[in-house]
Amino acid sequence: METRTEISSLGEFGLIKRINSGIKTTLPDTIRGIGDDAAVIDTGEEFGLLSTDMLLEGVHFDLTFFPLKHLGYKAISVNVSDIAAMNGIPRQVTVNLALSNRFSLEAIDELYAGMKAACVDFNVDLVGGDTSSSRSGLLISVSVFGKVKKDKITYRNTAKANDLLCVTGDLGGAYLGLQLLEREKQVFLANPDMQPELEGKDYVIQRQLRPEARMDVIYELAEAGVLPTSMIDVSDGLASDLLHLCAQSGVGAVVFEERIPIDEQTYLAASELNIGPITAAMNGGEDYELLFTVSQASYDLIKNNPKISFIGYMTGDKEEIVLHTKGDSWVPITAQGWS
Ligand code: ADP
Ligand code: MG
């Protein structure tokens, strides 16, 4: 009998590793293949960047509370985020859709209105795609092409011991926004007359429904004359994405809990839902902030930027990736992708 191995025995990261181990790139202009936020292609004067991300109904979004316009915006934004993570500028996107007859023309218009708004915000052109029918819900898959000057690219595998660890914006909000939306959905299903209780929660809801790729910070870093030594976007949670940086760079890290940026609304939602705010920041995901390292010499150049938090530093011991808690204990940082 043929052996059958469950995918769950590997998990997401193990699966990607396995796929990668069976793939060799051969072309001289393929500079970087699987393993970073975007593939890197030598286009002559500059590097081209190529990345793709899909959103699946029932897995990544629930249409009972996800407005199509926001969904369209998010589909573009999360792709742009991967270009930002390479210190690149996004240029063109293509859009693949699979839909059922459940969708009206007006619904598709809404979806595209959101995508167009994101294209304006991030200054990208929508240049193509593919459309198919679907028997199992809506699927949106976006690919993005970007570019970066060759000496300005930032990879995941180039963090150095003693570099400072930085993160943009704040963390944990997108996850708690999703938990609130799901709670309200359950309340509504139980009693359709109930009005949703989402007042004062606009920020965390927006973090879930309409994340903004941090291109603003990419431009500000360039203006400040700071080139990160490594970078990744926080799509899976701080823990998981920090572990990627560390593993690929062969370094360890110390993170100070008290320095992890968490918004006031995120704290409120966390206490209401009885979820630890640090857990949400560490393992929640979908914040689409940038996690990057800089040399200590860069500190003065960006220390006053309110969008950037210094949350720790990198160490030479790749076995030690630890959180220093507010209670003065040291906790190993561990994480998983979906399983
Ligand atoms: P991100 O969260 O930045 O989008 P992922 O964790 O999805 O990155 O993917 C990590 C790396 O693995 C990327 O380089 C991506 O292109 C690659 N990858 C993911 N899935 C596949 C796949 N099915 N086949 C080949 N490469 C993949
Ligand atoms: Mg990424």
Image (cartoon, grey):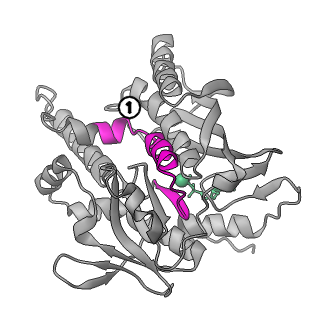
CB of mark 1 near ligand 1 (< 8 Å): no
Q: On the rendering, which quadrant does ligand 1 occupy?
A: bottom right
Q: Name the residue nearer the viewer: 254 or 10.
A: 254
Q: Element type at marker 1?
A: loop
State the image coordinates of residue 317 (x, y, percent, origin top left): 49, 88
Left or right of 67: which side holds 185? Answer: left
Give how far across and how far down residue 173 sits, in percent.
28, 49
69 above or below 157? above
As for residue 209 lying within the magenta part, the answer is yes
Task: Report x, y in % for residue 321.
Answer: 42, 80
For residue 88, which quarter of the picture?
Answer: top right
Residue 279: give x, y in percent of width and height.
27, 65
Image quarter for residue 260? bottom left
Tell me the kind of residue under disc 1: Leu
The reply to whether residue 103 is in sight is yes
Q: Which residues are magenta?
A: 206-234
From this viewpoint, which residue is outermost toward the right? Answer: 27
From the viewer's side, name the closer residue of 209 and 163: 163
* Residue position for label 1: 63
Q: Is residue 226 left or right of residue 197?
A: right
Residue 59 seen in render: no
**10 Å crowding of disc 1: few (<14), some (14-19), many (20+):** few
Residue found at x 39% / y 56%: 302
Residue shown at 16% from the left, 54% from the top? 267
Vertical side of 322 occupied by 17: above or below: above
